[in-house]
Image (cartoon, rainbow, N blue to C red):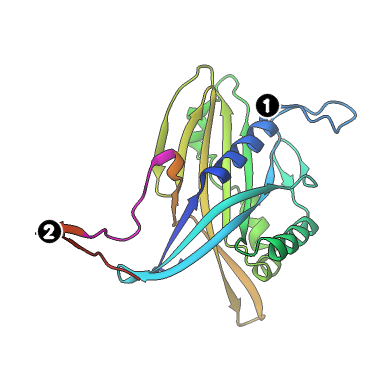
Amino acid sequence: MDKEKEIFIIIKEEALMEMVLSALEGFAIKNLEKKKPQNKYLEVYGLLWGSLVKYFGNDIENYIYTISHISIDTTAKRSKDSVESNDDALILKKDVITSFWPHYRFLGDFHTHPYKRRKNFDYKAIEKEKLYDFTDDDFAFIEDNAEFWHEHKYEIGIVMTIIDMEKSWHIIEQVKDNLIMFNLGNYRLWIKGYWVSYKKDKKNNKIKANVTDDIYLRCPYLTGMCEFLEFGKFRKGQHKGGEIG
């Protein structure tokens, strides 16, 4: 990642709600589309919509991505350990958003990692094995399709991991700069963020994607207000402004 940049990803309350509802539905509700009722614990796939603000502050270039909405792909092919997206869904939805809600732009995608609690496997195993991270297939999904994603300005990847717990537990924690963990009753969830940048390979003139988790992920609804620049001070009866872009 270019160290001259700081990447912030902000998840708004509405987007969080859409993530949670879709993740729980795929996890806890049987899929009735199958001739034989499909077991639960299915992955879910959706697209991220919001805005990007760039500014120079604290002697560094800052990118702030705000995720405002999630559109779940109903045509995605889902299973317990994978999900296959439909490129046509992105093209259609991007056309609609651009035409009628131009204040939003396509940012990237969202998918889930569902895990069923079983003997010798619970939330502690997820944390120990870091199963809330992108899998090799997740990285390949972006890197192997770099030309397509670059064309559509895919820059943010969000994964939500979920597992059921034996007991209800209330907890919210900013585990790392790029990772948030919280409970909803008996469900434990982790949200992890990634940023994607692109560079043209001079040898073969093809676009290459670089995926990094060196970002700051924030969800004010869960973890409270966050500060992006040093806030000004109140001295001698006057407010002294902080650094502005």
- Which of the two marks, 2 or 1, is nearer to us in this view? 2
Classify mark 2: helix, strand or loop. Answer: strand
Reply yes or no: does residue 223 show up in magenta: yes
- Residue 228 seen in render: yes
Alpha-carbon span between mark 2 and mark 1: 55 Å
* Residue carrying label 1: 28
Percent x, y of residue 102: 64, 65
What span is in magenta?
222-232
- Is 87 left or right of 126, judged from the image as shown? right
Neighbourhood count class around disc 2 (C-alpha, 10 Å): few under 14, some 14–19, many 20 upward: few
Neighbourhood count class around disc 1 (C-alpha, 10 Å): few under 14, some 14–19, many 20 upward: some
* Residue carrying label 2: 235
- Residue 4 seen in render: no
* In the rendered image, the vertical position of residue 165 relative to residue 93, given as above or below: above
Within the image, what quadrant is residue 55 found in?
bottom left
Look at 53% across and 17% down and name the residue there.
166
Foreground: 113 or 229? 229
Majority secondary structure of magenta residues: loop
Identify the amino acid type marked 1: Ala
Report how many numbered discs are placed on residues in the image: 2
Q: Residue furthest top?
A: 167
Percent x, y of residue 234: 16, 57
Within the image, what quadrant is residue 95 found in?
bottom right
Of the residues under marks 2 and 1, which one precedes in the sequence? 1
- The answer to whether the residues at label 2 and label 1 have Cβ atoms under 8 Å apart is no
